[in-house]
Image: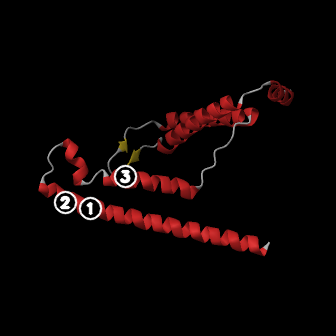
Amino acid sequence: MEDSNKSEFETTLSISPAHVNGLAARMRTLEEDCREIERNLDGFKGILYEYAGEIPERSRRQMRRTLAEILNAITSMRLELQLPEQVIDLDKMIESRLSHMWVTLHESKSASLRGYGVIPEDLSRYLDPRIDAMLALLACLREALRESTAEAKGRTLRRRRSE
């Protein structure tokens, strides 16, 4: 009976492309938030931030079940309304994050901090070499990403030639 209702629902509901795209974007955000909660239910301690507090095990189990129900509902909506799945190339996501990190680091140099007041020379001598060192590490990450991308393209070309 459910299958016949589902088919009837799918064939009778007409959604404009604008509504499909808008709803897909909202459901992606909902999914991302659910997954972020899932990842951090046990808390998280970083270097400069922490998700502190303790949620009792019984509550965490209930929250995980409820999050799974929400994710199942999103899956059903995706299938029933034919919402598009967004596919992002891993290398493009990493490149985007690296670019954001590069900007953040450059804005952390002493010259960029002048908007907060006069920069003591000691702070400049301390900060700038450390920021430059992290920028060099970002360059290493970018190079590793470029190498992996070039390697993957080479494998694809060899595979196509052999077909």
* Quadrant of the frame with the N terminus: top right
Of labels 2 and 3, the one closer to you = 3
Q: Residue at x 44, y 64 (%)?
A: 141
Q: Which mark is residue 126?
A: 2
Q: Residues within 10 Å of mark 3 (few under 14, many from 20)?
A: few
Which element type, helix, strand or loop, lies under badge 2?
helix
Q: Which one is closest to the eye, mark 3 or mark 1?
A: 3
Q: Is residue 127 above or below residue 42?
A: below
State the mark number for residue 161: none
- Residue pictured at 42% horizontal, 51% vertical: 100
Whether label 2 touches label 3, CB < 8 Å: no
**Residue 78 vertical placement versus 136 (above, below):** above
The CA distance from mark 3 to mark 1 is: 15 Å
Q: Quarter of the image for the C terminus: give it.
A: bottom right
Calculate the distance from the C-alpha at mark 2 to the C-alpha at mark 1: 7 Å
- CB contact under 8 Å: marks 2 and 1: yes
Look at the numbered disc 3 and give the secondary structure of its residue.
helix
Q: Which residue type carries mark 1?
A: Arg
**Would residue 121 be found to the left or right of residue 102 on screen?**
left
Q: Name the amino acid type tagged 2.
A: Tyr
Residue under label 1, please give it: 130
Residues packed near mark 2 inside 10 Å, few (<14), some (14 to 19) or many (20 plus): few
- Amino acid type of the residue tagged 3 in the rendering: Val
Where residue 151 appears, as percent x and y from the top left, is: 59, 71
Query: Relative to residue 157, is residue 18 depicted above or below?
Result: above
